[in-house]
Image (cartoon, rainbow, N blue to C red):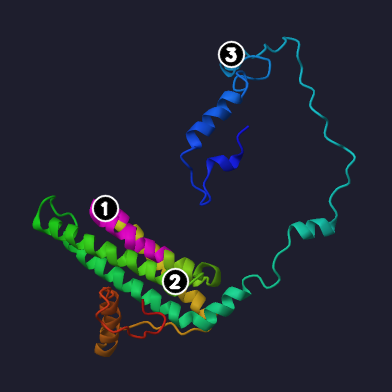
Amino acid sequence: MVPPAAFFSHHGRLTRRAPAALASVLLALPLGACDQQSSGPSVREALEQKAPDTPPDYKATPKPRPQDLPPPTDAEFAAWNRKDPEGEKHLYKWDKANGQRMLEYWEQLQCFREAVVAEGTKAFGAEPGSPAEEQWYQYKRAYVVFVDGWQKRLFAEEPRILEKSKFIGNILEAHEHVMHNYPKAFNDGDKTELEKVDAQWTIVEQKVKKYAKSLGIEWVERDLTDPKQAEAHKKVCDFVFTPPDRSGKEKKRTKKKGSI
């Protein structure tokens, strides 16, 4: 037998002696070493064999279930049905401390709703290929990018928000309306579907109002006929529809949470 060291140099690489040494090792092996196998059919034969037929008088005899087990005790039921004594109090506590910021996210979603309704109304029932239909198509291409990016930035700004807040459920529901349901209703020119989405939006909005009120958070109902309030709302919407600078040329600005 050639020692293993004969295959390698002191650097651990194969030497020129390796082919000859390897050949001598192979010649020294018994001829049948590679052909040895256990007795029995080959793999192909085993696969081709037919499964034995089940005797016609065969009857399954499942193991009977035990009948003498005592019923679960009250303590066992309580352990199985245990609930966190604090429960949703953790969520309420977080939402109360951060609720104003969550309502700012809600106002940003209102900006998306107002924009998609305004543009979709222009193209509602428009003839395919018409200027109005083409304008709606081009608008959606940019709009969807903004709405999708908004949600991604939300999760980046609010790590683990799904575990912390009850507000987020309603916010994501409203996001689905502005991202998918409103555009689809306008695409199809379906008046009934549009009314349905409007009703669903109102329901979600009422849920947010009720929850905010239960936490003692002030719900600001903007009167857009008031120039000052209209201007404040416009600033929010302008920010929402301003794409974030990705070039790195603009100096990094500090921003408060809630402005995504």
Q: Is residue 182 magenta?
A: yes
Q: Are marks 1 and 2 in contact (CB under 8 Å)?
A: no
Q: Is residue 106 magenta?
A: no
Residue type at the position of mark 1 = Asp
Residue 66 seen from this side: yes
| Secondary element type, mark 2 | helix
Residues 112 and 205: in front is 112
Q: Residue 45 got which mark? A: 3
Residues 154 and 13: in front is 13
Q: Residue 163 got which mark? A: none
Q: Which residue is mark 2?
A: 206
Task: Judge left or right: residue 36 versus residue 67.
Answer: left
Q: Could you tell me which quadrant the C terminus lies in?
A: bottom left
* Residue at 72% across, 10% down: 55
* Residue at 70% across, 65% down: 83
| Secondary element type, mark 1 | loop
The residues tagged by marks 3 and 1 sit, at their Cα atoms, a distance apart of: 64 Å
Residue 85 percent location from the top left of the image? 71, 71
Residue 120 seen from this side: no
**What crowding class fits label 2: few (fewer than 14 Cα within 10 Å), some (14-19), or many (20 or more)?**
few
- In the rendered view, tell whether residue 188 sits above or below residue 49: below
Q: Could you tell me which quadrant the N terminus lies in?
A: top right
Which marked residue is nearer to the observer: mark 3 or mark 1? 3
Residue 52 percent location from the top left of the image? 67, 12
Task: Judge left or right: residue 34 versus residue 101.
Answer: right
Magenta-tinted stretch: 173-193
Residue type at the position of mark 2 = Gln
**What crowding class fits label 1: few (fewer than 14 Cα within 10 Å), some (14-19), or many (20 or more)?**
some
> What is the residue that sits farthest to the top in this orientation?
56
Q: Which residue is mark 1?
A: 190
